[in-house]
Image (tube, rainbow, N blue to C red):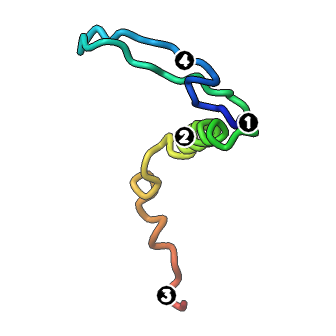
Amino acid sequence: MLACGQPDKMGYVEYRCLQCGQGTHVVAISCQSSLCLRCAKVYVDNWVSQVSQVLHVGGDLSAQHPDSSRNVPHAL
């Protein structure tokens, strides 16, 4: 976990970009552990994105229920 993302310790993968054609791009290998703060952030961000998509499937709730914001009694 301490060496996560460090190409000289964890290793790396080299890609040659076919679009820019300027040499190779180095991508460091991560440990992919849920105990590693760097890698756990990726898992949390993906989870939040999935939950957000599930909760917002219908889009804006006020557009689906236009009178939902006007259900407050006048007595209040």
**Is residue 48 shown above or below 16?**
below
Screen quadrant of the N terminus: top right
Specify the label residue 49 is tagged with.
2
Specify the label residue 74 is tagged with.
3
Please tell me which of labels 3 and 4 falls first in the chain.
4
> Is residue 18 rendered to the left or right of residue 64?
left
Residue 9 in percent (x, y) is at: 63, 24
**Is residue 18 shown above or below 36?**
above
- The secondary element bearing badge 4 is classed as strand
* Circle nearer the viewer, 2 or 1: 1
* Circle nearer the viewer, 3 or 4: 4
Please tell me which of labels 3 and 1 falls first in the chain.
1
> Is residue 8 rendered to the left or right of residue 31?
left
- The secondary element bearing badge 2 is classed as helix
Question: Mark 2 to mark 1: distance in Å?
Answer: 17 Å
Residue denoted by label 4: 12
Question: Mark 1 to mark 4: distance in Å?
Answer: 20 Å
